[in-house]
Each structure stands twice: as C-alpha cells, then as structure tokens.
Image (cartoon, rainbow, N blue to C red):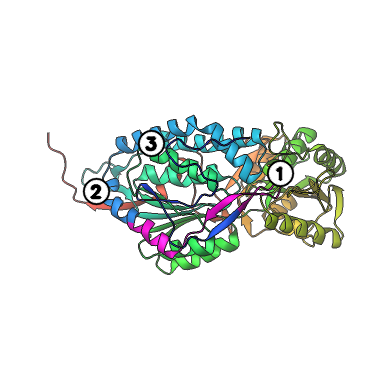
Amino acid sequence: MNIEPHPDRDTHADDGAFYIGGQWQTPQAGEMLANIDPATENVINHVACGSAADVDRAVAAARQAFPDWAATGREQRLDLLNRVIEGYAARETELAAAISLELGAPIDLARSAQVAGGLSNLRAYAAALSSMELCTPSVAGSKTDMLFKEPVGVCALITPWNWPMNQVTLKVGAALAAGATMILKPSEHLPVTHRIFAEILHDAGVPAGVFNMVNGTGEGGGAPLVAHDEVDLVSFTGSTRAGLGVAATASRALKRMTLELGGNNPAIVLKDADLEPAIRFIVEQGMRNSGQSCNAPSRILVDESLYERAVEIAARFANETVVGSPRQPGGHIGPVASALQYSRVQDFITRSVAAGGRVVAGGPGRPEGFETGYFVRPTIFADADDTLAAYAEEVFGPVMCMRAFRDEDEAIALANDTEYGLAAYVHGGSAERIRHVTNRLQSGMVHINGHLRASGTPFGGYKLSGVGREGGIWGIEEFLELKSVSGWPAMVG
C-alpha cells in the first residue's frame, strides 16, 4: 500500500509542518511523536506536537481572516464547498490508503465508509447551504422584524482518531458553509490523513487563514486552543471525560460549544422481530470498525422468549467475524487503533470475566495467528448486568453484552439506564410496538430494523453523550449566531 505524496510538497517521512495562514509552517517547539502502525506495531513516521505558541499563530491567522470571510455570500461559500468536494473525490484512494495504514481500518472499509462518509458530509452541507434561509422575518408576515443568521467567529475544532474524515468534515464543512474561520486540532495518530485533507482545502482555494491546522496532543495543542481568548466557539468530539474538561474550560468564557461525546448504545430486539437478520445486523454494526464507533450498538437487549436463540445466533456471528490485516481486501475487522486502546479493551474483557461474565464468543488476548499488532478477539458476554464493566461502561472495542427483558417497559428502562444517550437500535414487527418503544428512548438517534442514519440528518445525543448536533442544516446552525432586528427598512420598488 503506497501513499503517494502530493506533487507540490517535499517527500519526507516525518510530518513536521502545520498549516497556518495559507502556508505550511514549521512548529515552534519541534517535539516529535512516533506514529505507530496498529497492525505491525512499527513506526510509520513522526508527527510534530503543537504548543501554545503554534496555537497563537493559528488563532491570529483565523482572527485576521474572519471579517472578509464572514462578509462573503452564500454563493461564494457554496462555490468553495463544491471545489473542496471535487478535490476530495479526486483523492479518495489516497485518503483510504492513509486511513488504513494509520488507523488499521481494513482497506475496503476505509474506502467505502471512512472516506465515503466524509464526502457524503460535504455534499450534504452543500445541499443544506443552498436551501437554508439566512435572513427571515422573525414574526410571521412582518417586513421590519427580521432574523439574521451570522457566522459565530473563530472556531476551535478538535477531532478524534476513530472516524477521521467523517468527524473532520462534519466540523470543517459546517464552519466553511457558515462563514466562520477555524483552527483544526486533529488526532495526532493520523498525520498523513489530515495532511492530505489540508492539501485538498489549500488546492480548492480556501482563503488564507480561514482554515488552519495544528497537530499534537490534547494537552499541548487542544488545551491552549480551547482556553484561547480569541476563540469564540469550541466543537469537540471525543470521550465524555475529556469533553467535560473542555466544557469546564470553555464555559469560563461563555464560549459556544458543540460536544459529541461517548455512548453505550442499546439494541432492543422485540418478541416479534425477525430474529436472525436482526442479530446479524446488530453484531455486524457492533464489530464494524473494530467496535470503535461512539454510536455502535454495545448492549443487546432481547425479549426473554427469544433470548437463548439470540445468544446462540450472536455467538455464531461473532465467531464468524474474521480478524485480518487492514492491507487485505474483504469484510473483516482490523486491529484497534493503538497500544493504549488495546490495553483498555483487554482490561474491560478481563475484568468482566473476573466478575463472572459468561463469555459465549471471543475472550481475552489476541485472535489465533496474531502475535503482534493490536488485534482483539470479537467478544460477546451473555447474561450481562451492571456488575460487568463491559456492560456498564463504554468499551470502544469489538465487545458486546447481551441481556434478557420481560416486557417492553423493562426494555425501555434498561435501555435508558445509562449516563449516555447517543444512539439506540430497535428491531420488531409491529409498527405500534416500535413507535411505543422509540418514543420513550432517551437517545438522540434511533435506528429501526436496520435503517441507518442518512447523511445530512442530525448527529448527536442526550445526557452525557453531548451538546448540540452535527450534520446538514443543524450542523451549520451550530456555527451561526442569531441577530434579531426590529425596524428593518423595507425595500422600496
């Protein structure tokens, strides 16, 4: 798998430059962090770690660019978005190769979901911007009481590693459409991937300072960015623990915030569900991307009349889930993303086994045939409850738990018995029963009988799963302020 360098820059193994003010610039501190291939545990390259000084330069560039970019019209922003879309589509193969190498995502998944998801987000934002009303009467029928939607200002965008292009495009695309300027602090684990994306924006003609990118750790780059006096909005995707810290810092200055955080998502299988297809779908979604998706189903709740059959089916599908090299084509899963993530997932499994968890598939350790790499056995616990760490907490790996329920009321109570509320899945045959359950779930997104979220619909959740929504019109509106004007001069002629 070769990643061809962009023709307009030097070829070098290490990614030691930041994109600030429309140019690639040398970091102030010069500290480099090893970037590890999760499939082999070998060093791919090194990525520069940003400091407060780098953040200052990037914020200054974004602040300087904001007045002119905010003053642009819808058509100018739409033209730019379409050029970004064109450039992104032209480099899909290169992006997929980079994501597969750096994240460990199987190449087919990297191409068909990881990269394709980012393209879908950008297209959805272009469609949303073309139809949004940015100036409307604030009172029905009024010609003098008007409501204007205006860009919020300079925005800090902080993204994680698990779906890099999906999460970067959800933020960058919305900010561009809104007329905001931004500083992206992406995950330090995918420097090649994010450099390609920055090159796409540069080649599309994004004005200098509108988009800036500083690599590095959360402590070195993310923290000073969130705390910066000249940042007006913080859009963060990551763990709930980290998100609470971001919220505490940003709230001291009453900054606008969008937080997309964790999940421990229920999948409810009602007594009239088509059992085998339902369980297959749930297990496939739970294991996809090696379980590293905040919206993946992780707690499978099954009507007691179907439970034992469901356990057998789930165990069979999990055991049939192939673990393999991310370099190879196919529908298998790859490693988890890092040594830290591998250790964390293994800890959840071993603690749950020690607590008496009934393992029906997988278990601790690497799959057979893997002595190196951060590969995890697809694992399912049956008869789970809150005494199992893998049931009570967000694992973020290919680990799922199953539990029986007596009736719909208990299913709803179990589904809602979590500090999270990101996604839920419902499978059943009766429309009335499905509506009854769905309407009582405390979840930002509900997927019924295998129907997944369409691009351009709102992504986000209740409770500790976050604040605000991303995607489509809702994502753009997070980057807009509302101005109510009374006595607006009526147009003459």
The spot of residue 150 in percent (x, y) is 31, 49
Query: Which amino acid type is marked by label 3?
Result: Ala
- Does label 3 or label 1 sit earlier along the sequence? 3
| Label 2, label 3: how far apart the Cα atoms are | 38 Å
> Can residue 308 be seen in the rendering of this structure?
yes
Residue found at the far bottom of this picture: 252
**Of labels 3 and 1, the one closer to you:** 3
Tell me the magenta residue range. Answer: 35-60
Q: Is 233 included in the stretch rendered in magenta?
A: no
Q: Nearer the viewer, residue 455 or 108?
A: 108
Q: Nearer the viewer, residue 359 or 323?
A: 323
Q: Which mark is residue 425?
A: none
Please indicate whether residue 409 sits to the left or right of residue 191 in the image.
Answer: right
**Of labels 1 and 2, the one closer to you:** 1
Please indicate whether residue 106 sits to the left or right of residue 246 in the image.
Answer: right
| Residue occupied by mark 3 | 204
- Does label 2 or label 3 sit earlier along the sequence? 2
Tell whether label 2 touches label 1 (CB within 8 Å). Answer: no
Q: Quadrant of residue 345 in the image? A: bottom right
Describe the element under mark 3 as helix, strand or loop: helix
Please indicate whether residue 474 sits to the left or right of residue 364 in the image.
Answer: left
The spot of residue 441 in percent (x, y) is 63, 50
Residue found at the far left of this picture: 493
**Of labels 2 and 3, the one closer to you:** 3
> Can residue 255 be seen in the rendering of this structure?
no
| Residue occupied by mark 1 | 286
Query: Which amino acid type is marked by label 1?
Result: Gly
Tell whether label 1 touches label 3 (CB within 8 Å). Answer: no
Q: Is 52 included in the stretch rendered in magenta?
A: yes
Q: Which mark is residue 145?
A: 2
Describe the element under mark 1 as helix, strand or loop: helix
